[in-house]
Image: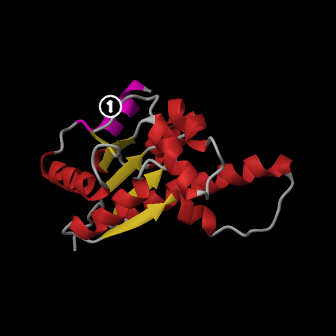
């Protein structure tokens, strides 16, 4: 059997922007099998043991790097993946650009106005107050996506349909190819 490369639908947005809800809907509307790989789920696999604050950044950095390589491993083995991720540090996007095959990534900007993000954050109650606001500028700073959706205007199912309908005619070079060439 000829090796196949998996497609990565990479949802990028702040906390509370709706990435996980869109990912759940994508699993229902896409014809091929996909795996949802969430940064939150990946972090939830780590022990709950408390670590000294001076070690926390190192531990989190390695966790994110492992997450990126797990995505690349799944796609490299021919699996389709829906990723939901918060690119709130420059090095995270750079690392993803380095380890993922840019031809196989559909980079989706998941946007939402800050006031709505803050409202959702308060309603959820499971995120630190102001988290989305702290991530707001950095997450979309690179400015390049294959497709974008605004979750204040479209519900998760509508966003999932928009993404699904985009896939057959996705352009080349991809956003990841353009970002890699730029950086």
Residue 53: percent from the left, percent from the top? 84, 49
Most foreground residue, 45 or 137: 137
Tell me the crowding category of disc 1: few under 14, some 14 to 19, or many 20 or more residues within 10 angstroms, Cα based: some
Which residue lies at the image location 53% right of the left edge and 42% below the top edge? Answer: 118
Q: Is residue 63 above or below residue 27?
A: above
Which residue lies at the image location 61% right of the left edge and 43% below the top edge? Answer: 131
Which residue lies at the image location 55% right of the left edge and 57% below the top edge? Answer: 124
In the shown orientation, is residue 158 left or right of residue 96?
A: left
Q: Please identify the dominant SS of the magenta region.
A: helix
Q: Is residue 146 above or below residue 5?
A: above
Q: Is residue 168 above or below residue 153?
A: below
- According to the image, label 1 marks what residue? 178
Judged from the image, the secondary structure of the residue bearing numbered disc 1 is helix
Most foreground residue, 153 or 46: 153
Q: Is residue 134 magenta?
A: no
Most foreground residue, 56 or 139: 139
Picture quadrant of residue 23: bottom left
What is the magenta range? 173-182
Residue at the outermost bottom position = 1
Residue 62: percent from the left, percent from the top? 66, 53
Most foreground residue, 183 or 121: 121
């Amino acid at each position: 059997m000829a090796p196949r490369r998996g497609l990565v639908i990479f949802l990028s947005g702040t906390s509370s922007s709706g990435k996980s809800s869109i990912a759940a809907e994508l699993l229902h509307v896409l014809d091929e099998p996909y795996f949802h790989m969430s940064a939150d789920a990946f972090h939830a696999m780590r022990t709950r043991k408390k670590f000294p604050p001076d070690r926390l950044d190192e531990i989190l950095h390695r966790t994110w790097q492992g997450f990126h390589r797990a995505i690349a491993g799944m796609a490299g083995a021919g699996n389709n993946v829906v990723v939901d991720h918060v690119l709130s540090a420059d090095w995270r996007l750079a690392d993803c650009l380095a380890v993922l095959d840019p031809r196989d990534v559909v980079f989706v900007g998941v946007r939402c106005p800050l006031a709505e993000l803050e409202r959702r954050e308060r309603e959820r109650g499971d995120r630190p107050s102001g988290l989305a606001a702290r991530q707001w500028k950095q997450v979309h700073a690179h400015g390049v996506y294959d497709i974008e959706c605004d979750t204040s205007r479209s519900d998760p199912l509508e966003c999932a349909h928009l993404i699904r309908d985009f896939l057959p005619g996705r352009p080349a070079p991809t956003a990841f190819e353009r970002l890699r060439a730029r950086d």
